[in-house]
Image (spheres, rainbow, N blue to C red):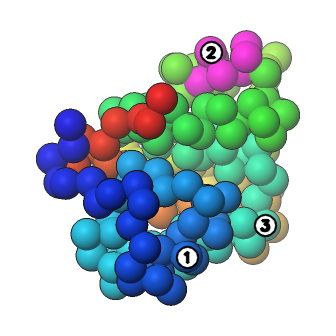
Amino acid sequence: MTRIALVPLDLAEPKEVVAAIRQRRGGALSNLDRVLLNSPTAASAWNAFLGTVRQRLSLPPKVREIVMCVVAIQNGAEYEYFHHSREFEAAGGTAEQTAAMSDPAKAARNEALFDAQERVAFQVTLEMTRDVQLSDETLARAKEAFSNEGLVDLMVTVGAYNMVSRIVVACDIQPEH
């Protein structure tokens, strides 16, 4: 059970906030939404920001999902990994790649399974999540693999999903199954 009460699945108020979240989610509220909706103002801001990160930034979907999975693995956010490993495969990732992600540091060097941009995304995500700072070497590799826009979008996605994992872990939010 979560450490913060889940609002009811059929929550209808505040109407604008709940409707916006349901629209982004395809109709249903996730357990994360149900925790966040204890603070409608926070839930509204979260929905707008994460909706932008998920749907409007320039990262290829597969790279975006790698970031989300690596953050989840590094921070012990089972809920986040449960959802985003599925999204990774829906974005073109293979079961073999998903299995390889269980060791993100090794995956960052796996030329057989991941392309250069994906490997850099692993490394950027690992360093930003673990150390906050990027090494000069990793930043140089990232600048080769991404445009300036893509690199900023990569960093924003890493930061955003570290935020997500902090809430998921602190509240002990579990997958919906």
Which residue position holds label 1? 19
Q: For numbered disc 2, what is the local secondary structure?
A: helix
Q: In this rendering, does residue 24 appear at all? A: yes
Spatial CA distance of label 2 from label 1 is 36 Å
The rendered magenta stretch, by its main secondary structure, is classed as helix
Mark sitting earlier along the chain (2/1): 1
Query: Is 11 above or below relative to 40?
Result: above
Q: Which residues are magenta?
A: 95-101
Q: Residue at x 55, y 55 (%)?
A: 28
Question: Is 26 displayed left or right of 157 in the figure?
Answer: right
Question: Is 39 displayed left or right of 152 in the figure?
Answer: left
Camera-near label (3 vs 1) is 1
**Crowdedness near tag 1: few (<14), some (14–19) or many (≥20) residues, C-alpha within 10 Å:** some
Which residue position holds label 3? 58
Residue 133 in the image, given as x and y percentages of width and height: 41, 57
* Observer-nearest of 49 and 26: 26
Amino acid, disc 2: Ala
Q: In this rendering, does residue 74 appear at all? A: no
Quadrant containing the N terminus is: top left
Camera-near label (2 vs 1) is 1
What's the mark number on residue 99? 2
Mark sitting earlier along the chain (2/3): 3
Is residue 162 within the magenta segment?
no
Mark sitting earlier along the chain (3/1): 1
Residue 173 in the image, given as x and y percentages of width and height: 30, 43
Q: For numbered disc 3, what is the local secondary structure?
A: loop
Q: Residue at x 62, y 59 (%)?
A: 27
Q: Residue at x 33, y 79 (%)?
A: 40
